[in-house]
């Protein structure tokens, strides 16, 4: 009996650091998008960010997340599928290993499964919050309000 697309994605998320497990559930042309398609500045803070290819990219992301943060919680709140598409929603709580800063963020995943294998996964989170768990000094100044007001963190 073959697994449904939702079961395949769920199985990937239950054991994302075991390369043989991940290879058994992903296609040879697997694409993983973590947080954005390409952002060189963010990649300096979180090296797994951007678009990558192969089962190894998914494994390396979860290995690196475990090095950069202590994972205190990862909860799937909803997952469902329609044809080849799978959606997963939840939240996680991490503590940065260097600074000890705590962050809780919602996450969402869009995955595609064809022929019994996942060939695409996109993981999104509150990237501003997670990157701030690594902020050790300085300030950020933003000017988004058309009225001219600055926001400084």
Image: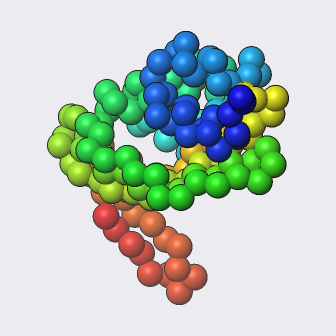
**Residue 116 picture location, percent across and down:** 75, 29
Q: Residue furthest bottom?
A: 147
Q: Residue at x 65, y 24 (%)?
A: 25
Against 42, is 127 above or below? below
**Residue 86 picture location, percent across and down:** 68, 48
Q: Residue at x 70, y 39 (%)?
A: 4
**Residue 112 picture location, percent across and down:** 74, 40
Left/right of residue 25 with respect to residue 104 in the rendered view: right
How is the protein colored in the picture? rainbow
Against 51, is 135 above or below? below
Q: Residue at x 75, y 37 (%)?
A: 113
Residue 69 seen in this snapshot: yes
Judge by depth and name the residue closer to the eye, 127 or 92: 92
Left/right of residue 36 with respect to residue 91 in the rendered view: right
**Residue 33 picture location, percent across and down:** 63, 38
Judge by depth and name the residue closer to the eye, 47 or 115: 115
Judge by depth and name the residue closer to the eye, 72 or 35: 72
């Amino acid at each position: 009996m073959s697994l449904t697309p939702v079961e395949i994605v769920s199985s990937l998320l239950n054991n994302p650091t075991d390369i043989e497990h991940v290879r058994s559930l992903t296609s040879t042309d697997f694409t993983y998008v973590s947080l954005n398609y390409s952002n060189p500045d963010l990649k300096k803070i979180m090296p797994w960010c951007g678009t990558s290819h192969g089962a190894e990219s998914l494994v390396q992301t979860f290995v690196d997340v475990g090095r950069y943060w202590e994972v205190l919680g990862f909860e799937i709140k909803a997952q469902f599928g329609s044809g080849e598409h799978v959606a997963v929603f939840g939240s996680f709580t991490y503590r940065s290993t260097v600074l000890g800063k705590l962050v809780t963020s919602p996450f969402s995943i869009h995955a595609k499964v064809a022929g019994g294998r996942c060939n695409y996964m996109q993981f999104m989170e509150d990237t501003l919050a997670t990157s701030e768990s690594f902020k050790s000094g300085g300030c950020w100044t933003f000017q988004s309000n058309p009225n001219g007001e600055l926001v400084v963190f």
